[in-house]
């Protein structure tokens, strides 16, 4: 019977239409300003925060995994009458409800809005001021620790410092704010702030540092309160300035990075041998395309630990194109990898500010801005790979 079933399956697949590597749908035809962030709800459905054309904060909740349909929520901030979505970060709270950290351009403060339901419908939202500033919360990142308390990484633009704020209770009624890396010696900190929670529950924070001479990456593990910043807190640029860094943590809390190598205009991958990034730091070029690659980057890990990177690549086609590409690593250190386009349209600029997440089924989900159309787009790869059909029958073999 198994042989017969395999033969029937083979014939069916032989004449079946090809399954695309990724499906792409338009979330908001716009015009919008983009700047998305993405999280996965407890029901497995993607939730995307982004900026409207007027500078407001919006939230789109997909009604099914492919995001062919969904509901849109526009937030209004009672204290100021406005919110902003350019610097935002969405995460799922311990109650299963979405929360978004964002920069308020009127108060110039770091704020948090928490939905009172999983779908945010009906206007149920609570606002909290996390850091009243002034001039804070640029490049904000949000996570929840194992106790359900919100933790924020962000830049204080007035001090040019990398900051961390920790809520002392789940309601964020009391907040502790720490300066992790202050402006010193002409070195500025806090750009492209990112945050994750290690397996020990400690916040792990990265951000770009820069001076007139060079750029590098701050990397700090905050296992203590207040956070003790180690003397060697830098993930170096490995010989060239960096831009648009992104971070993810392996299951053992060892970090991996994707970033733009400015000297070679290339997409880079970096990783550390231990959770605190001491000792040797490694990097390799993944895409050194002739017209440049990695101007925008995002990184996530599949359930088996393989990194997957979404990025923008300039492509020499008629009329030119800046396209959304994905690199799928074949192993945890990306010794070998596959590269393929997700949204490549001649004469168009797509793949701006990608945000990436891995769904509960292992599928790769990417939200990004199409600046040519002024629209917010969503791409979904299959659970096995962003490269090729999703059945994997020939890669994995038939049932024995």
Image (cartoon, rainbow, N blue to C red):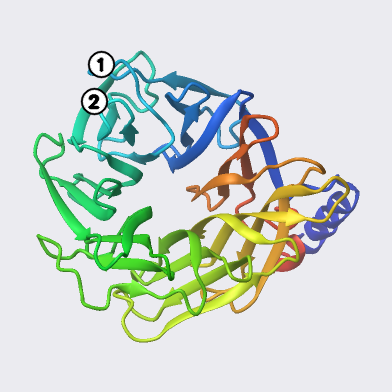
Looking at the image, do the residues carrying marks 2 and 1 touch, with CB atoms under 8 Å apart?
A: yes
Q: Work out whether residue 342 or residue 320 is closer to the camera in this orientation and state it.
A: 320
Label placed on residue 78: 1
> What is the quadrant of residue 173 in the picture?
top left
Q: Residue furthest bottom?
A: 279
The residue at which mark 2 appears reads as 127
Asked if residue 46 shows in the view, the reply is yes
Quarter of the picture containing the N terminus is bottom right
Task: Using residue 37 as the reference point, say whether residue 102 is left or right of it.
Answer: left
In this rendering, does residue 98 appear at all?
A: no
Count every numbered label the image shows and give the total: 2
* Residue 301 on image: x %, y %: 49, 61
Q: Quadrant of residue 137?
A: top left
In the foreground, 305 or 226: 226
In space, the residues marked 2 and 1 are separated at their CA atoms by 8 Å
For the C terminus, the quadrant is bottom right
* Quarter of the rendering containing residue 392: bottom right
Residue at the location (41% across, 75% down)? Answer: 236
């Amino acid at each position: 019977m198994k042989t017969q079933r395999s033969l029937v399956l083979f014939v069916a697949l032989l004449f079946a239409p090809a399954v695309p590597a990724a499906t792409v749908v338009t979330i908001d035809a716009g015009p919008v300003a983009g700047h998305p962030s993405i999280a996965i709800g407890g029901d497995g459905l993607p939730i995307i925060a982004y900026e409207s054309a007027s500078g407001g904060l919006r939230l789109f909740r997909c009604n099914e995994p492919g995001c062919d349909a969904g509901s849109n929520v526009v937030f209004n901030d009672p204290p100021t009458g406005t919110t902003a979505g350019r610097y935002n970060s969405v995460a799922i709270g311990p109650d299963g409800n979405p929360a978004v950290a964002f920069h308020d351009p009127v108060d110039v403060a770091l704020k948090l809005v928490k939905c009172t339901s999983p779908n945010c419908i009906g206007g149920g939202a609570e606002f909290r001021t996390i850091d009243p500033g002034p001039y804070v919360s640029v490049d904000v990142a949000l996570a929840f620790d194992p106790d359900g308390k919100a933790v924020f990484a962000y830049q204080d633009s007035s001090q040019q410092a990398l900051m961390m704020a920790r809520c002392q209770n789940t309601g964020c009624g009391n907040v502790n704010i720490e300066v992790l890396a202050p402006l010193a010696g002409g070195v500025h900190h806090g750009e492209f702030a990112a945050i994750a929670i290690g397996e020990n529950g400690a916040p792990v924070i990265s951000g770009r540092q820069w001076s007139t001479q060079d750029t590098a990456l701050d990397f700090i593990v905050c296992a203590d309160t207040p956070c003790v910043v180690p003397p060697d807190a830098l993930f170096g640029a490995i010989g060239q300035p960096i831009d648009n860094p992104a971070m993810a943590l392996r299951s053992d809390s060892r970090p991996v990075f994707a970033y733009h190598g400015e000297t070679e205009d290339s997409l880079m991958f970096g990783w550390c041998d231990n959770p605190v990034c001491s000792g040797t730091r490694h990097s390799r070029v993944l895409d050194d395309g002739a017209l440049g690659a990695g101007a925008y980057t995002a990184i996530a890990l599949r359930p088996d630990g393989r990194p997957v990177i979404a990025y923008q690549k300039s492509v020499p086609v008629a009329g030119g194109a800046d396209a959304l590409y994905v690199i799928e690593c074949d192993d945890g250190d990306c010794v070998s990898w596959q590269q393929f386009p997700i949204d490549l349209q001649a004469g168009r600029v797509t793949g701006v500010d990608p945000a990436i997440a891995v769904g509960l089924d292992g599928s790769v989900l990417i939200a990004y801005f199409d600046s040519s159309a002024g629209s917010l787009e969503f791409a979904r790869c299959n659970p096995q790979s962003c490269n090729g059909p999703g059945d994997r029958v020939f890669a994995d073999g038939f049932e024995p």
